[in-house]
Image (tube, helix red, strand yellow):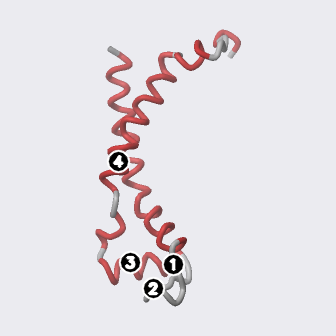
Amino acid sequence: AVVSTQSGHYGRGGAAAAGMVTPFDVIKTRIQTVTPGVQNVTYSGVPDAFSKVIKNEGFGALFKGCVPRMSVIAPLMAIAQSVYFIGVAESLFGINTANY
């Protein structure tokens, strides 16, 4: 029962973290995918990218893809942290946790 309760917390925590970093990931992707001469918008840096995205597309554009990202990260975090908590990884790899 403890792992079940904690895995829900881990999932919500992972989803919240994914939601909080989404604007930065959107900006990073925008900067990386700019092709000068092909697109109308170019960015001179991170602050410039933030201001242009908000000005041209609105604040909500910073959260494009947020729900799918949160939907993927939540179960991944819940599974990973639960497996770590119950010690499956240690027993699978033959690690003696008494030595820690």
* Mark 4 and mark 1: Cα distance apart in space: 25 Å
**Whether residue 70 is situated above or below residue 75 in the rendered picture:** below
- On the image, which quarter does residue 51 sit in? bottom left
Quarter of the image with the N terminus is top left
Viewer-nearest of discs 4 and 2:
2
In the picture, the disc for residue 70 is 4
**Dot placed on the residue nearer the N-terminal end, 3 or 1:** 1
**Dot placed on the residue nearer the N-terminal end, 2 or 3:** 2
In screen coordinates, is 57 left or right of 31?
left
**Dot placed on the residue nearer the N-terminal end, 4 or 1:** 1
Please provide percent x and percent y for residue 93: 64, 17
Residue pointed to by mark 2:
39
In the picture, the disc for residue 54 is none
Near mark 4 (Cα within 10 A), the count class, few <14, some 14-19 or many ≥20, is: many
Residue at the (41%, 82%) spot, across then down: 52
* Mark 2 and mark 3: Cα distance apart in space: 14 Å
